[in-house]
């Protein structure tokens, strides 16, 4: 897991030493990453120590967070990862690849159609 430099610097400046990262099932594209500046309930695995900050997650989500890049944009967390299939319009929620190219293409097309409909209604 890699966080953007500005977020890490902010946490260091404020003396944050433990951060919880976990998935929540919501958002227009499917899932979101939730980041809390303390050790949340159910966080039973330490992932990594980066810039004097220890990251905690659920044992069931360790693999997900191992190769992920997370960037803070305002109050949203944007995920960059090889296994992300689509992002929502604002970028804060995402769907994971199924590794079946036909299913993944259908999901991307569905998301593009949804975004075009939203723009047409603005």
Image (cartoon, helix red, strand yellow):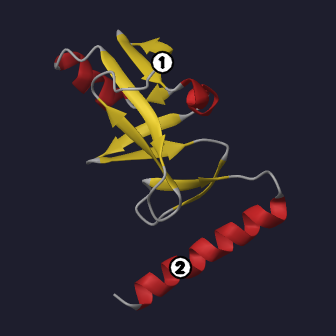
How many numbered callouts? 2
Residue 44: assigned label: 1
Examine the rendered structure and indicate whether residue 24 appears above or below residue 1: below
**Which mark is in front, 1 or 2?**
1
Q: Indicate the position of residue 90 as horizontal and vertical percent values.
A: 40, 62
Which one is earlier in the sequence, the residue at label 1 or at label 2?
1
> Is residue 12 shown left or right of residue 56?
left
3D distance between C-alphas at marks 1 and 2? 37 Å
| Quadrant showing the C terminus | bottom left
- Is disc 1 placed on a helix, strand or loop? loop
The answer to whether mark 1 and mark 2 are in CB contact below 8 A is no
Would you name the residue on which mark 2 appears? 114
Q: Which of these two is toward me, 21 or 114?
A: 21
Examine the rendered structure and indicate whether residue 68 appears above or below residue 84: above
Q: Residue furthest bottom?
A: 121
Residue 56: assigned label: none
Which residue is at a point 78% across and 64% down the rendered structure image? 103
Q: Indicate the position of residue 26 as horizontal and vertical percent values.
A: 45, 56
Q: Indicate the position of residue 117 as horizontal and vertical percent values.
A: 48, 86
Which residue is at a point 75% across and 67% down the rendered structure image? 105
Q: Which of these two is toward me, 9 or 56?
A: 56
Which residue is at a point 49% across and 52% down the rendered structure image? 25
Mark 2: give few (<14), some (14-19) or many (20+) Cα within 10 Å.
some
Q: Residue furthest front?
A: 42
């Amino acid at each position: 897991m890699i966080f953007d430099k500005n977020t890490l610097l902010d946490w260091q400046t404020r003396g944050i030493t433990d951060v919880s990262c976990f998935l929540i099932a919501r958002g227009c594209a499917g899932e979101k990453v939730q980041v809390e500046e303390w050790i949340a309930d159910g966080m039973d695995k330490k992932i990594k120590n980066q810039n004097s900050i220890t990251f905690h997650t659920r044992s069931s989500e360790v693999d997900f967070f191992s190769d992920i890049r997370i960037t803070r944009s305002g109050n949203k967390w944007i995920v960059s990862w090889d296994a992300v299939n689509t992002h929502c319009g604002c970028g804060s929620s995402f769907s994971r690849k199924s590794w079946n190219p036909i299913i993944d293409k259908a999901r991307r097309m569905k998301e593009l159609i949804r975004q075009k409909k939203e723009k047409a209604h603005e």
